Image (cartoon, helix red, strand yellow):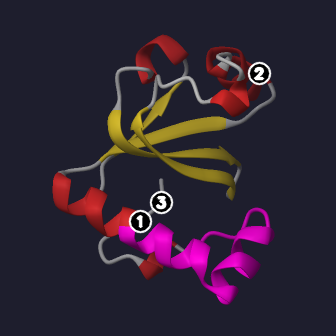
Amino acid sequence: MLSWKKYKYYEEAEQCQNCLFIFKMGNQYHYVGKAENFAFQAPRFDGKLNILFDALIISGFEIHIAELNNQQWLEVDNFMLTLIHSEQGKAILDRMGEVDFIKIPNLIGP
């Protein structure tokens, strides 16, 4: 079972490693991602992940993060690679807000 924690400040969240993160509004999951290091500044964010984080919070989103143990990290990593490379997976990823946490054993969203 995962332990999800809601974060209100980027400075708290940037310490998280080997984690899943969710941008959630109401009952809808708008983005689910994984990160070895949440503070990593991905090129697509141009080093401004903290600004994106703050903008989402101000806009009404909640950010939830669950840190994973080694086994959970491998399961999620393998699941995501399979999903990304399958035709069905590509179709699922193209539909925003539709995340089925039941696909990974013991994975329950916040």
Find numbered disc 1 in the image and state the secondary structure of the residue it sits on.
Answer: loop
Q: CA distance from mark 3 to mark 1?
A: 4 Å
Type of secondary structure dominating the magenta stretch: helix
State if disc 3 and disc 2 touch (CB < 8 Å).
Answer: no
Give the residue displayed 47% in from the left and 11% down from the top: 11
Task: Count neighbours of disc 3 (C-alpha within 10 A) and say few if under 14, some if 14 to 19, many if 20 or more.
Answer: many
Which of labels 2 and 3 is toward the front?
Answer: 2
Name the mark on residue 78. Answer: none
Residue kind at label 1, given as amino acid type = Ile
Give the residue displayed 44% in from the left and 40% down from the top: 65
Residue underneath mark 3: 109
Of pointers 2 and 1, the one earlier in the residue sequence:
2
Find numbered disc 2 in the image and state the secondary structure of the residue it sits on.
Answer: helix
Residue 27 part of the magenta segment? no
In the image as oriented, which residue stretches furthest toward the top?
A: 11
State if disc 1 and disc 3 touch (CB < 8 Å).
Answer: yes
Give the residue displayed 74% in from the left and 29% down from the top: 56
**Above-or-below relation of 36 to 110:** above
Question: Magenta segment, which residues?
Answer: 78-99
Q: Would residue 42 appear left or right of 17 to someone viewing this image?
A: right
Q: Is residue 107 visible?
A: no
Q: Give the quadrant of residue 54.
A: top right
Which of labels 2 and 1 is toward the front?
Answer: 2
